[in-house]
Image (tube, grey):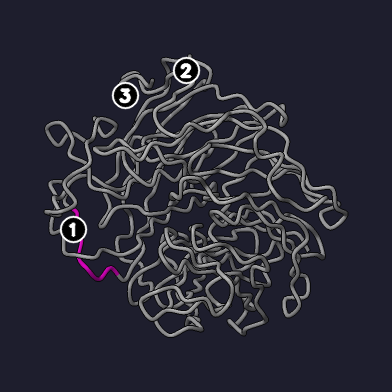
Amino acid sequence: MRTPPRPLLVLLLALDMLAFPIGAGATHATDPHSQNFHALGESFEPASFLEPPPLRINSDLAFWGRLAFEGSYDGFRIIDISAPGNPKEIADVACNGNQGDVAVWGNIVVRAVDRPQRLPNNDLSRACEGVDTDAVVHETGFEGLQIFKIDDPRSASVANLVAAVPTDCGAHTHTLVPDLARNRLIVYVSTAGSATFAGPTPYGTSCAAVHPKIVAVEIPLASPAAARVINNNIPASERGCHDVAVHVGIRPPLLVGACRPEAVVWDISDPANPVRLYGVPHPVTGGTWHSASLTWDGKLFIVGWEPGGGSQPRCQATGADLGGGLVQTDEMKSLFFYLAANGAPLGRWTLPRPQSPAENCTIHNYNVVPLRKRYVLVHGSYQSGTSVMDFTGPANAFEVAFTDPLPLVPTQLGGVWSSYWYNGLMYESDITTGLRVYNLSDRVTAGARKLDHLNPQTQEIVLE
């Protein structure tokens, strides 16, 4: 069981068996997979969907050196990945608030909070003691970014919440940009939109049904406790952005937003004040973009969407009846490729293996393998698992490898939140089971660049 959030950093002494009775062994080695896709190790973390919260739902990943940081709806974990066949959790930070996506820079960890939190005495210094507000009455509270300083991940006493930065409509996702010339980090905060008006909060923020912007937060590296909003109104699209990605190595550096309903591209030569270049409409009427990434040479960007909100089976056989007058289309289970210079469409790739009506599925979070002269992408797509796709010829992209687990029993929400390539291996964050590591035995990724760190939505070097 987890200890209360003071001290924040706790070591797991025993396996938490709160909810799903899923075995912790090499269970996924027997999942259906291509012959070149090999299961290595797993750091098991069972989910809990129990109400009232805190919920434990594993979310996104970031990497620094030989450590993986896995977010969750009630905190984040630090995992030693130096032995990929036996990744070891070394710390568990308890801090409520979904979605819990994480980014890392050195000993600074940034976490996103997208559900209003009722804090003791409205005290932002106690932002890890929050309780989810009542979603029915749309009570306001703290939501935005939580910023931690972690000097030694193996110590149980030195992880500190140093700042909580409220942002309008919270932080559904966030993207970190190193601005080292000014000794700071810029974090772009995105929201998925607000269904109802939530009004002003005790922290000077507000939220409305229409949220056509992203927000920039500055974190001074010398004093992360002084983090603050420095641009509260970066014009985005009609209903804001779900996710954004940056490439700061190219010239000009670009920000690409999976926005609603457009994909938007900005010049971020001044990262605090992005300049919009153009927008790309969604190819499906009523569709909205979800995730974005760029190639390492900066020439293409990739966007996908999340029909059904991630909880519905949207990867069924083309033409299947989805209910409510909806029919499964190829576009619902596709990634789209565009020329970064002007947004010209170059092609799309469609998931080749239909999923069952019992499996929640869309193409979710992904990154591009750091290669020269070849485009390869690793994606996690809920209950369709993880797939590796070659789009060097974007009009004729094809799948290289996959693992595709059987449907969860009993039928439930689950699957792979995100899958990323990092230093020769693939890492999955699974909603219900935690972190898994895989190896690909295929020449398609030969020569992939090793990195000191990886925030998957941030690219810092150019590979051509």
Q: Residue at x 49, y 23 (%)?
A: 91
Residue 5 is labelled as 3
Relative horizontal placement of residue 17, taking residue 334 as reference (left or right): left
**Residues at discs 3 and 1 in contact (Cβ within 8 Å):** no
Can residue 210 be found in the magenta stretch? yes
Q: Which residues are magenta?
A: 205-211
- Residue 412 spot, x, y in % from top left: 43, 49
Q: Give the residue type at disc 2.
A: Leu
Could you tell me which secondary element the residue under label 3 belongs to? loop
Relative horizontal placement of residue 221, taking residue 423 as reference (left or right): left
Could you tell me which secondary element the residue under label 2 belongs to? loop
Q: Give the residue type at disc 1.
A: Ser
The residue wearing badge 1 is 206
Relative horizontal placement of residue 178, taking residue 369 as reference (left or right): left
Specify the principal SS of the magenta part.
loop
Residue 90 drawn above or below residue 279: above
Task: Between residue 410 and residue 278, name the one nearer to us.
Answer: 410
The residue wearing badge 2 is 11
Location of the C terminus by quadrant is bottom right
- Residue 226 spot, x, y in % from top left: 33, 38
Of labels 3 and 1, earlier in sequence is: 3
Q: Residue at x 53, y 37 (%)?
A: 433
- Is residue 223 visible to the viewer in this orientation of the structure? no
Task: Between residue 106 and residue 132, name the one nearer to us.
Answer: 132
Could you tell me which secondary element the residue under label 1 belongs to? strand
